[in-house]
Amino acid sequence: MLIRFLFSPRRGVTALLLGLLSPLALQAQTTNSGTDKFAQLETVLPTPNTYRTASGAPGKDYWQQRADYDIKVTLDDTKQTLTGRETITYTNLSPDVLPYLWVQLDQNVLEKNSITATTEVSQLQDRMTFNAIESLVSDFDGGFKIESVTGKDGKALKTVTNYTMMRVDLPKPLRPGQSFAFNVNWHYNINGQQVRRNGYEYFPEDQNYLYEIAQFYPRMAVYSDNQGWQHKQFLGGGEFTLPFGNYKVSITAPADHVVGATGTLQNPSQVLSATQRQRLEQAKTAKKPVLIVSQAEAVQAEGKRATGTKTWTYAAKNVRDFAWTSSRKFIWDAMQIKQNGKPVLCMSYYPKEGNPLWGQYSTEVVAHTIKTYSKFTIPYEYPVAISVHGPIFGMEYPMICFNGGRPEKDGTYSAQTKYAMIGVITHEVGHNFFPMIVNSDERQWSWMDEGLNSFVQYLTEQEWERNYPSRRGEPKNIVEYMRTDKSLQTPIMTNSESVLQFGPNAYAKPATALNILRETVMGRELFDHAFKTYARRWAYKHPTPADFFRTMEDASAVDLDWFWRGWFYTTDRTDLALESVKYYTPSSGDPAVEKARQQQLQAAAAPSISAQRNAQELKSTLVDEKPELKDFYNQYNPLAVTAADQQRYTAYLGALSPAQRQRLGQQQHFYELSLRNVGGLVMPVIVQLTYADKSTEVQTIPAEIWRKNNEKVTKIIVTKQPVVSFVLDPFQQTADTDQSNNAFPRQPAASRFDLFQQQQQTPPNPMQQVQSASGK
């Protein structure tokens, strides 16, 4: 079929035979510059074995260790200290003989001579906050004070402490299948609220404390098939990796404190009043949260000081950690839901300073999160889920998390505060799934818990409220970070302690990548099945990045090595450019039609500036003056239809098959799109076509279009009606960092600027403004 080239500002009139590429054009379509972005990750990922398979599933010989705890702690509300003693029973389920054990001493990160303190990089500024100065000159005496480490027989065990790790030398090697129990006695000073992960908040108005306690006990490090002991020092960035086990924890606190914790309360009749127990029963069938301790009751408790103590005992099965909270200021509400037929008691503990936000939203958010995460991953199987409001803006532990979001003292709050609170509760409760159940190694790979969790947080937020203003998940929200200089970025596959721009890199970028996988690369059905398969395979186990990557491919039949390589192993960015569009339409072959068309084109063509001026200024030419110089060609019209033309056309039609003659009569438009990968990240090409009748069509071309040339390709698109414009990524699906090169014809970016005399102060939140105007 003949193809005629109708218009190009660069090439003028030409012809092209569709379907045939010149050797030069073929070379342009198949040249890579050294690195094939579609190369498989076989040489990068660890070799599969009987513990971890090539499919991403646990192997037939998969094993993991176990650590059970019996802990007793006493909180001193006067001195802000914690004293504890514990018995750890460690079971060796590995095939290896262990001559020693490694125990984590995470509180030692707060010692004055910790690696964190001595390697902290900082710079003095012209304006310094008191908190910043305090962190530089603090004389806080932090860290564990280990009093003794003994065996069950009471004999001292030899130990060696290396910053946040303690080696316990065993009396005899621990063989496969054997258990070893030992005791640790310790105490430490509880840090103030300026430390993010745990500590206390002091309320000067009523002179009370609120405690959020975690990493409070020496706990076992992980010993695994893929790396042996995970005893990388805790520096504060990389969080935790821990073995599963059963916990029994007894917490002695002032008698007027309310204590919440991981697990279920074992002695409610000893620590709760009859009224509180009755309210808890009501909560099990309530449709909305029931107050176990009301605000009035909490305010009354704030003004008193009990002289005695109570011991609250909690038990938790098959968890990797334990945390708790304590204060006489707590309001406490609860509501039970059913998840996969099992009851889950959703609860919140918060001081009056958290209302009205916390009473209205917290427990409802907890329940919504448990339901939604269970839908997208695996059913939640723990008996409780708790949100606590205090000094820590966001930190997670099994069944309990610490969250921020506090209204103004007058009870008003901004939309930012409201959604930050809902978002952080969703995020931290969601951590029950990643990494509390799907137990990835946070010390090594923050993205495996923060990134996966931020992705499901996005899905959960969107099911909380239509058009919820999610911070992370939408591709357009990561563009600003992806634009930053590469020297300020690190690949997602970077150790937790070495990550630059921790929030964007560990949270937002992997969450965005998964959203792009779900919406654009794989589709929701394939992605959701694969993601749930990963969660199901690795629930209550220790997955690695390779297990995730392999499972997502194994369960979907989608080759994603190019995606993992680009998004997780590099700092490339998405920037696909539509450099040019050439327009072709099939020739009819009829000389009467084609020559008439060329006559119209010639007549419509603008004469050159020289031709225009010559027409005005040049009175005559030599041929005008000497007609004898004219010959045949001065009278010849090459666009006149001749009998020979008609004969050739008739012969041409006679040689065509019926199908070819039908094709010749169809009206079709051919567009050759020149595409360039400017940012280096290969991605699907999503192109929106706008037709002459203003209707639109979106075509999605898989990323494999770049497989033979990672940098530039051409793509021919055939339409039945003329196209007036092409736009790449019209719905901002791929985090394209430069939209100025996405449209053809080019579309200038519309924007506005504000004129102002001076920088205005931030106005009060809208709720405060309305109440002030109404006299409330």
Image (cartoon, grey):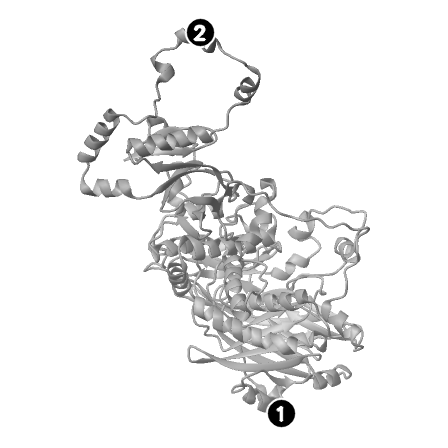
Quadrant holding the N terminus: top left
Element under label 2?
loop
Compared across the picture, whether 363 is left or right of 588 comes to: right
Image x and y of residue 750, in percent? 62, 47
- Which is more toward the observer, 99 or 556? 556
Judging by the rendered image, the residue that carries numbered circle 2 is 626
Image x and y of residue 449, in percent? 51, 59
Residue type beneath disc 1: Thr
Residue 183 visible in the displayed image: no
Quadrant holding the C terminus: bottom right
Judging by the rendered image, the residue that carries numbered circle 1 is 275
Residue shown at the point (33%, 26%) measured from the top left: 640
Up the image or down, 70 lies above or below 23; here it is below
Compared across the picture, whether 256 is left or right of 338 comes to: right
Residue type beneath disc 2: Lys
Q: Quadrant of residue 389?
A: bottom right
